[in-house]
Image (cartoon, rainbow, N blue to C red):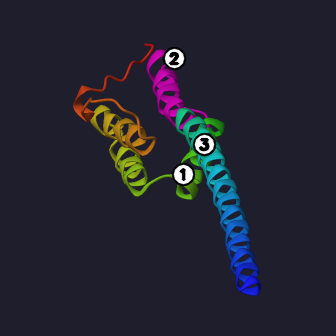
Amino acid sequence: MCLDSIVISAIIGFFSVMVGISGYAFQNYYVKSREREKREYRIRRRRYEELVKMPAEICHITQTRNEKTSLDLKKQMDEVTNRLHLYASGDVIRSLKVFVAKNEDEEFRNLIFALGKDLNMKADLTASEIQWSRAT
């Protein structure tokens, strides 16, 4: 009888230790995954902000200075847009392709809307309500 209680106590102790270890491992995994998600979000947001600046800068140069955009600026825009395939959602990439093909305000608003949606922004605006401000 005494041996049975020792075995039961050992089994209970073993399971208690295993539950503690698995709880620690799960918590550690969860915290690290949340940190990784936050880091990826910050990177994606910074790159999206860079993407939004480029068309506005190109428009500003062509409208205010009546110049063609420089090859350097076009190369910079290509670098920004080509990196999107690594981290952007399908909606963002499709919206960008349409914007580059048509280069119209409506398509830029759709792109901005897709970027905000991909970043889980809590705005209740529709794409048609987004105003693109240009310094002209």
- As helix, strand or loop, the secondary structure at mark 2 comes to loop
- Closer to the camera: disc 3 or disc 1? 3
Would you say residue 132 sits in the magenta stretch?
A: no
Of mark 1 and mark 2, the one earlier in the sequence is 2
Q: Main secondary structure of the magenta part?
A: helix
Question: Which residue type does callout 3 highlight?
Answer: Lys
Q: Amino acid at mark 2?
A: Arg
Residue marked by disc 2: 65
Label 1 sits on a secondary structure element that is helix
Residue at point 43% right, 53% down?
93
Q: Which residue is mark 1?
A: 84
* Horizontal and vertical percent position of residue 68: 52, 30
Q: Quadrant of the N terminus?
A: bottom right
Q: Residues within 10 Å of mark 3 (few under 14, many from 20)?
A: few
Which residue, given by chain and number where applicable, does mark 3 sit on?
38
Magenta residues, start to end: 50-70
Give the SS element for disc 3.
helix
- Residue 110 occupies quadrant: top left
